[in-house]
Amino acid sequence: MDRRARFSWALYDWGNSAFATTVMAGFFPVFFKEYWASDLAATDSTFWLGVGNSAASTLMVLFAPLIGALADQGGSKKRYLLLFAFLGALMTSSLFLVAAGMWPVALLLYALGIVGFSGSIVPYDALLVDVADDAELDRVSALGYALGYLGGGLLFALNVFMVLRPEFFGMENAGQAVRVSFLMVGVWWAMFSLPLLLFVHERNPRPANKQVLRGALKEIRDNLREVRRYRMVALFLLAYWLYIDGVDTIVRMAVDYGLAIGFEASDLLAALLVTQFVGFPAALLFGRIGERYGPKRGIMIALLIYVLIVFWAWRMGDAWEFYALAVVIGLVQGGVQSLSRSLYARLIPQDRAGVFYGVYNMLGKFAAVIGPLLVGWVAALSGDSRLGILAVLLLFVAGFMVLQRVTVEE
């Protein structure tokens, strides 16, 4: 396989991960509340931010299989990836122009940015089978996640420094630094999409149906029926939905949990950066583990470590432990994600990777639905946030047990 094509494919993860770190996880929630929606009550701004996130996620849940099916037609994976990527990059850059108080505009651009980010992931994942042979799937998938952690982390670290020291960069204040950060993310994302445009090509693309939309809808219907016949695909998707819900719950609830048990926000932000940079070499390591021992075994090792992480989080009491947990999470998070993608590639018909990865990403968007509700429900009933985080064990254990039944050879 073309080494340049593999690296160009992985560089897209380097580019789009800046949106996930700087915008989604880092600056937008805080800046939305304190700048664009500063005239709203705190509860109202939280409500509208939740509406924006939920609306964008719901759109992707509904349309991810359709995007995959359309991308399968006539070798269009790259075309749809770039369409969504440049939509996301343009919307993110446009946040730079939104003035204080214009929270509806900011929220709309942010939601469209999420649509661009999530929509591009469907054909991006499906392109894995075009840039890697079976023996290389684990390593190439891991390379994508590793570069994503490194690229997203580097830009996020620079953006945090800009906000902390705006005068060093010739800016008036932290607010201007945040707005410039949004512009930088859009440019970064678009720039690192170009190698994929130039050097990645589909192998043996399927001919397009003359009635593209009708053909795509028919393919979705046929393939959803076929998933039931692909017993191992169905089993894996169930396992994936369970354990990735646990993984995403840890990611989304970590800061809230840290604050609830008394840690400082500055420590939590620093721990987020630690996770990003540890995730880079760790994802590459898990790619090697998948190559040598098989991706299923690599995922199961990571899930056992997640069980230990939950027990440790339940008992921890000092800030240094939160940093230590950030390191351990960084060691396994990218491994679970990359090996799941490469294991799934071995289970599906490769000439229909788009629509099958559409279903895969649809379940990914459903993730972190059960987990946060479970954490909140147990914490509310017991009055103890520590018992709430302990409830995530159910998702990891259930996912592990279902995954055990998946046999790649079958």
Image (tube, rainbow, N blue to C red):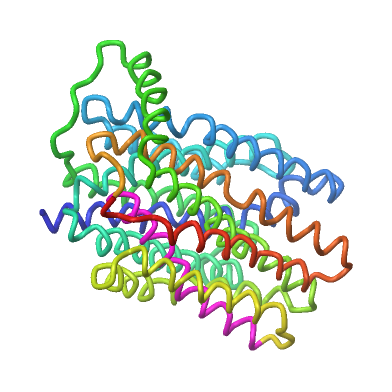
Q: Is residue 85 visible in this depiction of the protein?
A: no
Q: Quadrant of residue 136?
A: bottom left
Q: Quadrant of residue 50?
A: top right
Q: In the rendering, at what x and y percent does residue 316 appear? A: 70, 84
Q: Is residue 384 left or right of residue 404?
A: right
The answer to whether residue 327 is magenta is: yes
Identify the main secondary structure in magenta. helix
Question: What is the residue that sits farthest to the top in this orientation?
Answer: 211
Q: In the rendering, at what x and y percent does residue 289 appear? A: 30, 73
Looking at the image, which residue is at 72% across and 83% down?
315
The answer to whether residue 312 is above or below residue 173 is: below
The answer to whether residue 218 is above or below residue 132 is: above
Q: Which residues are magenta?
A: 320-346
Check the picture and name the quadrant holding the N terminus: bottom left
Q: In the rendering, at what x and y percent does residue 236 appear? A: 43, 50
Looking at the image, which residue is at 54% across and 36% down?
61
Q: Is residue 258 visible in this depiction of the protein?
A: yes
The answer to whether residue 402 is magenta is: no
Looking at this view, is 204 or 165 the one in front?
A: 204
Question: What is the residue that sits farthest to the left in this orientation?
Answer: 1
The answer to whether residue 60 is above or below residue 405 is: above
Q: Is residue 181 left or right of residue 75?
A: right
